[in-house]
Amino acid sequence: MTTLNDVAKKANVSKMTVSRVINHPEQVTDELKSLVFEAMEELNYRPNVAAKALANNRTQIIKLFILEEMDTTEPYYMNLLTGIAQELDARHYSLQLVTKNNFDIGACDGYIMCGVREKDYEWIGRANKPVVLFGENRHGYDFVDSDNQAGVAMATQYAIDLGYQQVIFIGIDIDELFEKSRETGYLQTMQKNQLPPKIIRFGNHSSGAAQYIKENWTHFSPNTIFVCSSDRLAIGIERGILEMGGKIPSDFGIIGHDGVFLDQIAFPQLTTVKQAVIEMGGACAKMLMTKIEQTGAAQGKILFKPELITRGTTRDKTLKIN
């Protein structure tokens, strides 16, 4: 049977280095990891994860809660799951997707929770294992998120710089911190440019946004842009404008938010604020692993800087209309 010593000799590294690659890959350079993984593959070496878990009094299981309706967020969570799973797999952990009703069923080493709402914090407080949230919160829980305020501020300033005279924010009708942060980014940027703000809110469905455009079409003059809190809302705005014969992007501009698939299937393709969703998923897993190793010590927050992706729903800067 191949041993850890055999792998170390094959890779020409110490036994301690092999152990570190297996148990703490984040502490090892990519070059060393490649050497050790190649040796493990050539020798058909498989770490004894069960023995490791038993020795450390661990289950090697992380539970993931997704607490919002996935029919309004797909494929966002598939990208997040990819990032989480890749990081946990590198650390020989299994990922278990569970529902709120199964909170107390089965053992695990920690929780990653997504789509958390204010009503959920009471029962989250019952967790007896380390918790990391995906999404900013005001309750002191460690979290990973996109910088929502900065992302919308960037989009709003870009819209203004393009010369659109009216900049309208289309928000999600929900009393949650991520939405408040996005609206704050819009409001502060409008105030900085001494422009009057206008905020309209809907549920996160394209149909409501499209219907709003059609019902209020006569109120929108050319040279208007809609900065949206999600790509789903942006698609609804786009559909409504096109159905009413509006010209995109010369007369009407649209900027979405998320940048996960939906922005690319729209036509014209959406200019959007793209979140680093896969990377954020990996960061959630890394933060939780560190928290487990440090017996629950607070980890704080990580905010990822979003990126503005410009496409067919905003005009070229060289064609700016004053």
Image (spheres, rainbow, N blue to C red):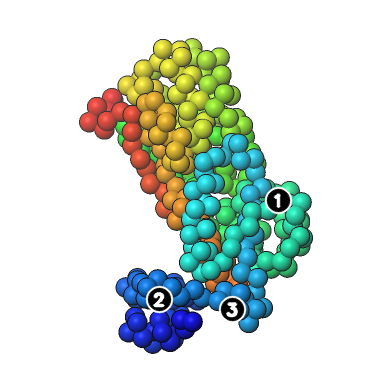
Q: Amino acid at mark 1?
A: Thr
The reply to whether residue 253 is in sight is no
Q: Secondary structure at mark 1?
A: loop
Disc 1 versus disc 2: nearer the observer:
2
Give the answer, above or below, for where 297 lies relative to 302.
below
**The quadrant where residue 139 appears:** bottom right
Q: Secondary structure at mark 3?
A: helix
Where does the image place residue 159, in percent across and percent down from the top left?
37, 34
Q: Secondary structure at mark 2?
A: loop
Disc 3 versus disc 2: nearer the observer:
2
Q: Residue at x 33, y 33 (%)?
A: 311
Q: Residues within 10 Å of mark 3 (few under 14, many from 20)?
A: some
Quadrant of the frame with the C terminus: top left
Q: Which residue is mark 2?
A: 43
Q: Which residue is mark 3?
A: 52
Q: Amino acid at mark 3?
A: Lys
Q: Residue at x 49, y 53 (%)?
A: 82
Q: Amino acid at mark 2?
A: Leu
Q: Which residue is mark 1?
A: 99
